[in-house]
Amino acid sequence: MQKIGKIAAMGAAMVMTALALTACGQKDTPAAASRECTADDVKTTGKFGEAPTITIPGDCTPPKKLITKDLSEGTGEGAKPGQQLEMNYTLVTWSDKQKLDSSFDRGKTFPLPLGAGKVIQGWDQGLVGIKQGARRLLIIPPDLGYGQGGQGIKPNETLVFVTDAVKVSGDSGP
C-alpha cells in the first residue's frame, strides 16, 4: 500500500509541475493576449518603391477597426473618391503571419478607382487622402476585408497591407 501512495504522490507532483509550466508559457498564446494591437506594434521595413517586409506581433490581438498609418509622406493633393490610383502592395494575413500576395513580386502596379467599390472596403476607406509617393500601412478587420473568406483568404481574417501610391490621377468619371 505504501508503494501505491508514493506513486500517487509522485504522479500528483508531476501533474502540478506540468500545469505550472503550461501556465508560465501562456503569455505567448493568442488567447492570453489582452490588448488590441496598434499600427506601431506592426513592424515594416523598406522604402517607397521597395518590396516591404511586414512583421505581425504575437503579444496583442488584431484591431477591430480600420487602422492606417503613413510610413512615408508623398506629395501633392490627397486622393479623393473618384480618383484613379496606381498602387503597389504587399499583403500579410494576421492569423498565419505569412505573405499572401504582392504586386511588387509581379512587377506590375494595381490600378483602382478609389471609392468605386471595385476593391475591398478597407482599401476604399483606408486609401482616402493618400498622396502620390506615399507609403501607407493598412490593418483591415474582416468586416472591411473578405468577411467570411474568399479569394484565398480564410474566414474572419485580418489583413495587413503596406501600400505605395505610385500614381494619383484626376477624376475617373465620364
Image: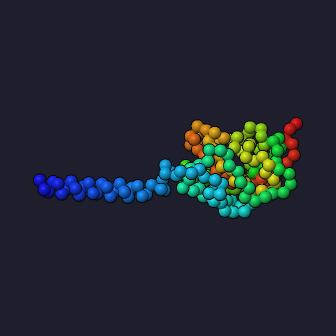
Q: Where residue 8 appears, x then y in whole percent?
A: 21, 53
Does residue 35 appear left or right of residue 102 in this picture? left
Q: Is residue 174 left or right of residue 145?
A: right
Viewer-proximal residue among 104 and 161: 161
Q: Position of residue 167 (x, y in %)?
A: 81, 52
Tell me if residue 54 can be seen. Answer: no
Residue 78 can be seen in this image: yes
Q: Name the one closer to the observer, 12 or 52.
A: 12
In the image, 132: left or right of 23?
Answer: right
Question: Residue 43: x and y, percent?
Answer: 63, 59
> Foreground: 57 or 12?
12
Residue at x-position 14% and y-position 57%: 3
Looking at the picture, does residue 129 appear above or below residue 133? above
Residue 153 x/y as whole percent: 59, 43
Quick check: 29 above or below 172?
A: below
What residue sits 28% from the left and 57% below the top?
14
Residue shown at the point (65%, 57%) measured from the top left? 40
